[in-house]
Structure formats: structure tokens, C-alpha cells
């Protein structure tokens, strides 16, 4: 992302702190008279944002870049993994991912758990990209961070999970 493009940019440290806070909030009572073991009640917005992100992740199995782009805000910011420059805008997403998806035999994202607080959604998942040739297959444990605004994914950052699955080439050997 161009450092001069937006004074209100969200830093990686802010995203990691928010993701940690989101996970912590999922395990802590919000106060009041509810016991600590009772899960917080999700708002309609949280239910819808979680649904949007979950369906987006499941729809990667279609390998249809236009369908996937329909979930994204026009000015989406997407970082595929740490250290990689952001992909800015829906058109750039289509251009960047279209060729990649068309060269895959299968895509499956296993969603292990999902948390939503307002516009923020975080998920823990294993992404499987199966190439026509096993040498081109990839499998990764991911923490996905999404900001959903007005029914569209506006910000999306994926982070590798330390100690998680990170396999490139060959048939899937993870658990």
C-alpha cells in the first residue's frame, strides 16, 4: 500500500491488536448479569457479517473470480500474506487472482472457527489450493481478518499461523 495514499490507513500492529482483542472478547463476558460461560448474543449486523465472510470463503471452491469479487467493496484492500504488497481495488483483485484460480483443479477453505464483533470478522481456517500437478498444490493455516462495511468486504488481511500447516507441493499431508 502506498504510505502516502491515506492518512487513516490501518497499520499491521493495529490489525494484530484488533484481532487479538476480537479473540479475547470471544472468551470474556461483556458484563451485566450473564455468567462467564454464556456466549455473548450476536447482533443482526454481526450475524450478517459472519454469514458474508463465511460464504465468501466457501465460494472460493467455485474458482469464479467474478463471484468472489462481488463480495468485495470497490476500494477493497487485500493483503494475501505478510510482507506482500496490498492489492487495492476490486479490479486489481480480479486481475491478480483470475489467472491463479483458473490454473487450479480445486480450492477448499476449511473454516475451523469464526468470530464477529460489529464490522470485524476473524476466522481460523486451512486453505487448500490443489493444482493440476501436485507440485503446484498449497495448503496453509490462516487467520483471516475482515472488515465488512455496508455488506461488502472492505479490508481483508490473511496471516500465517505459527506452528500451523504450511505445505507447498505434493499431496496434502497435514491434519
Image: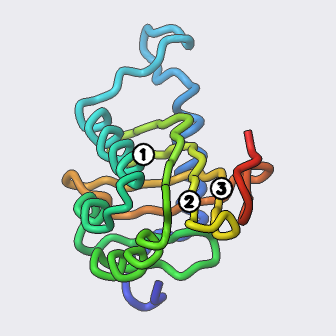
Sooner in the amino-acid sequence: mark 3 or mark 2: 2
| Residue at horizontal 39 percent and vertical 72 percent from the top | 77
Sooner in the amino-acid sequence: mark 2 or mark 1: 1
| Residue highlighted by disc 1 | 121
| Residue at horizontal 58 percent and vertical 53 percent from the top | 128
The secondary structure type at the circle numbered 1 is strand
| Residue at horizontal 49 percent and vertical 12 percent from the top | 38
| Residue at horizontal 53 percent and vertical 34 percent from the top | 113
Q: Which percent across, then down, holds residue 105?
A: 49, 61
Examine the rendered structure and indicate whether residue 154 appears above or below residue 50. Answer: below
| Residue highlighted by disc 2 | 129
- Give the residue furthest to the front: 133
Q: Are marks 3 and 2 in contact (CB under 8 Å)?
A: no
Q: How far apart, in angstroms, are the residues tagged by discs 3 and 1? A: 19 Å
Q: How far apart, in angstroms, are the residues tagged by discs 3 and 2? A: 9 Å
Q: Tell me the number on the disc at residue 38.
A: none
Residue situated in front as seen by the camera: 9 or 48:
48
Examine the rendered structure and indicate whether residue 149 appears above or below residue 31. Answer: below
Residue situated in front as seen by the camera: 130 or 94:
130
Q: Is residue 44 left or right of residue 25?
A: left
Assess disc 2: are there few (<14), some (14-19) or many (≥20) residues with their C-alpha within 10 Å of its C-alpha: many
Q: Are marks 3 and 1 in contact (CB under 8 Å)?
A: no
Amino acid at each position: 500500500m502506498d504510505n502516502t495514499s491515506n492518512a487513516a490507513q490501518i497499520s499491521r500492529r493495529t490489525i494484530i491488536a484488533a484481532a487479538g482483542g476480537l479473540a479475547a472478547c470471544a472468551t470474556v463476558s461483556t458484563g451485566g448479569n450473564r455468567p462467564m460461560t454464556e456466549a455473548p448474543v450476536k447482533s443482526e449486523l454481526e450475524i450478517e457479517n459472519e454469514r458474508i465472510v463465511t460464504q465468501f470463503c466457501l465460494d472460493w471452491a467455485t474458482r469464479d473470480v467474478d463471484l468472489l469479487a462481488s463480495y468485495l467493496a470497490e476500494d477493497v484492500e487485500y493483503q494475501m500474506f505478510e510482507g506482500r504488497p496490498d492489492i487495492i481495488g476490486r479490479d486489481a483483485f480480479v486481475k491478480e487472482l483470475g489467472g491463479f484460480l483458473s490454473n487450479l483443479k480445486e480450492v477448499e477453505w476449511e473454516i475451523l472457527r469464526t468470530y464477529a464483533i460489529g464490522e470485524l470478522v476473524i476466522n481460523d481456517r486451512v486453505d487448500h489450493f490443489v493444482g493440476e500437478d501436485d507440485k503446484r498444490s498449497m495448503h496453509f493455516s490462516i487467520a483471516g481478518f475482515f472488515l465488512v462495511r455496508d455488506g461488502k468486504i472492505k479490508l481483508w488481511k490473511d496471516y500465517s499461523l505459527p506452528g500451523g500447516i504450511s505445505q507447498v507441493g505434493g499431496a496434502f499431508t497435514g491434519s
